[in-house]
Image: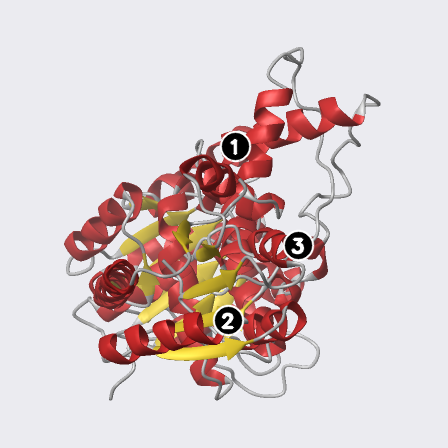
Amino acid sequence: MDRTASIIAIVQDSGTLASIEAACTAEGVELLTAAGSDEGWDLIQQSHANAILVESAVPRAAALISRITGWDPGAQVWLLNSDYTPESAVEQIEHGVSACLPLPLDDEKLSRKIAELLDEVRLRRETLELDERLLGAWQFQGMVGRSLRMIETFTRIRRVAPHYRIALISGPTGTGKELVAHALHALSPVANRRFLVCNCSAIVETLFESELFGHVRGAFTGATQDRVGLFEYAQGGTVFLDEIADMPLPAQSKLLRVLQNHELQRVGSPEVRKIDVRVIAASNRDMRALVAENRFREDLYYRLSMVELSLPPLAERREDIPLLQRFFVEKFSSLYGKHIGGITRRAQALLAVHPWRGNVRELENVVGHACMMTESEFIDVRDLPEHFRKGGRDASEPDPELMPLADLEYRYTQHVLERVGGNKLQAAQLLGISRATLYRILRDGSGAPARPWAGATEFSGGSQRLHIQ
């Protein structure tokens, strides 16, 4: 029979185990068993079970449940209680248990509970399949995004690409400016011609004109033969000038002539050569400010900005982060020849609140690092770079103020809640505590004075397993 879900049963009573086995067999669920807490804990860590059944008579059962819910606040833990009462069930649920079933087991009630679990598993799988289809739907020329800002950017690229001759792409480092340039070229009428990249910040100032426009033999010391420049070599295609703000002023003057007259002169030659190229420039700096400071030619800026595309930082398009995570996991798992199914809940929680100052490039590097380091099917906190494992706090950020530990605990919990939009389950996952502990902190600290948050504190990782959602 095709197994669609799995359950771990940590029980000692043979009759209870027989009931569980019969229900699981009837529903087509894989059953994994353990008789004690230590054996059960090892089994939980090794498997990806959808639910964990713990008999109350198992030695150290309460400690085991606390360990499970602390390790994975979203775990489905069902307590099989021989001393069941409605009051005790409510108390156990407040401590992180998902469900309480009285012993001896009611076979019909157990079967219904397993059927509900199967419905949840199917729904989750359908959601994952939908996410995979959505990932394909929200990809555009190597870029991924479903935020309004990115959809508007994709729309503008489609409209501009068939017609532009000159374009300027602006945005912080790591937002994907070169990908936009590639997209403009790929959707243009010259897509089958050359696309050449020039990193303006990497060229020595004295060689700028030679690199872009070429030179003739004897034009300067070391010019032993004629050399074709970037613009001539790209004839009929596209030139991408990255970090255009670093271009020296003399080269800017010659570039302006090329853009206005579609002609150039090689260094050391009086001959005027006609060219036909499309030019895309990019910068991560405020071009208007540079113009105001006379560090960039005003006339060149206006020529370049006839079509301007602005890319937002990742912090302004956080709804794209789950899609980007899935995209990069698939990319690097294929590149490294690994089967990586997703990212654990706690790792996702850390990624969700990270400031991403390096934008999409930083996220790509973090996921690539994690895919390289992981030895399991799921990326976990231990696979992330060290600064994530230490709580994601930058060295430049101030230390927490001196205060009573209870106040600090409450304030940091409130801080995390704000960062995750009030989602208590996600906050508990990020903090590495159970939901019951989270509620206790909020309840006990509700009378604490409201003061602005002054920093962050460290917390350790866990190893929940869940596909990217």
Marks 1, 2: nearer the viewer: 2
Residue 437, quarter of the rendered image: top right
Could you say whether the residue bearing mark 3 is in a helix, strand or loop?
A: helix
Could you say whether the residue bearing mark 1 is in a helix, strand or loop?
A: helix
Q: Amino acid at mark 3?
A: Ala
Q: Amino acid at mark 2?
A: Asp
- What residue is disc 3 on? 63
Crowd around label 2: few <14 · some 14–19 · many ≥20 (10 Å) = few
First in sequence, mark 1 or 2: give its number: 2
Residue name at image x 53 percent, y 66 percent: 367
Foreground of the two, 185 or 301: 185
First in sequence, mark 2 or 3: give its number: 2
Residue name at image x 62 percent, y 80 percent: 218
Q: How far is the residue under mark 1 from the one under mark 2?
A: 42 Å
- What residue is disc 2 on? 13
Q: Position of residue 145 (x, y in %)?
A: 31, 54
- What residue is disc 1 on? 417
First in sequence, mark 3 or 1: give its number: 3
User: Split into 4 quadrants, where in the image is the N terminus?
Assistant: bottom left
Marks 3, 1: nearer the viewer: 3
Check whether the beta carbons of the residues at disc 2 and disc 3 lie within 8 A of each other: no
